[in-house]
Image (cartoon, helix red, strand yellow):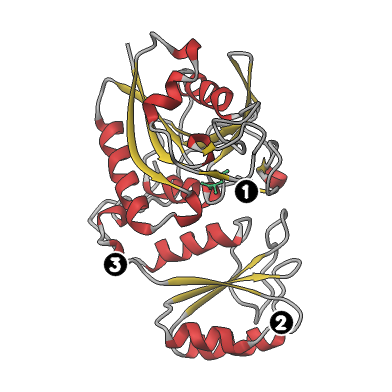
Amino acid sequence: MQITVVVATGGTIAGSAARADDAVGYTAGVLDAGALLAAVPPLAGLPIEAETLARLDSRDMDHATWAALARRLRALQARPEVGAVVVTHGTDTLEETAYFLHRTLRADKPVVLTAAMRPATALSPDGPRNLFDAVTLARTPGVRGVVAVLGGQVLAGAELRKLHGWRVDAFSAGDAGPLAWVEDGGVRVLRDWPRGEALREDLPDLDPAHWPVVDLVTSHAGARGAVIDALVAAGAQGIVIAGTGNGSVHRQLREAAARAEAHGVRVWRASRCLAGGVVGAPAGELPSAGSLTPAQARVALMLELVPPGRAGSAGLV
Ligand code: ASP
């Protein structure tokens, strides 16, 4: 019988508030993995291991935790008796962690992320149901890749994004749509499971202090090129500009980006719109991040700037 391992990293799903009617004033990451599972009675008796890797409010997610998480998940995936891993996480940086894991883990055993918008102490918490759905999905034959499940909606790790600040129905995969739905203990599959892409299994082994420095800048009315100049002076090796519309960038930032590129800094443009990404690559424009959100594009550029790793570590799985 295959084991599912639940790895807790913190977030609102593990959050605690002083009052049950308080869904926004709470402390994230209070509960450990065992306590999260104890709140889901239907999971009792299933072959599930629980461990707590971190108790972070995911707004404070950092590269050291990402490295530790990817290495731990890789070790769990390597255990033959482990069928899948579920990761509980905060919603704020879920899209970044999901994309990071999508690019650094093999896809043959699923990693199912889940989270919650209301703390565990809320009158009507969404975490227990989401954890139940995540374990249900993890135990479903044929699932692969890094995926997330929230509100029954199964989204690809490379596609999900947080669209709303506090409502329970806060996530979407933009134009790509969901991969599947978890419905009352069953899974309705709509699209193929992720196959993994351009793996950089070597990044988690690199000391996070040596990960490429990539920063994010937003284009807006009145934008100042001095922001990009300051980042270059502070050691940025890459910069992603969250552009307006279809990745358009303010003239001041375009001029500063040209100065940055002349210093060897890679500059990409993404879109600050909530869906659609950037299409087209007109001559003379900065390279586009395609369908990635600006925060995911930051991870992608960081991965691209890592020097070539161990032989055979990059490729499609
Ligand atoms: N700040 C919280 C976190 O990301 C929000 C949440 O989990 O919903 O950890």
Nearer to the camera, 171 or 200: 171
Q: Position of residue 244 (x, y in %)?
A: 73, 70
Q: Determine the residue positioned at 35% across, 14% down.
A: 47
What distance separates the C-alpha of mark 1 from that of mark 3?
27 Å
- Looking at the image, can residue 160 be seen? yes
The three-letter amino acid code for the residue at tag 2 is His
Q: Quadrant of residue 280?
A: bottom right
Residue 209 numbered tag: 3
Instruction: Report the side of 97 relative to 276 (left or right).
Output: left
Instruction: Report the side of 83 relative to 206 (left or right).
Output: right
The three-letter amino acid code for the residue at tag 1 is Arg
Q: Position of residue 107 (x, y in %)?
A: 41, 37
Residue 250 numbered tag: 2
Is disc 3 surrounded by few (<14), some (14 to 19) or many (20+) residues within 10 Å? few
- The secondary structure type at the circle numbered 3 is helix
State the residue position of label 1: 161
What distance separates the C-alpha of mark 2 from that of mark 1?
24 Å
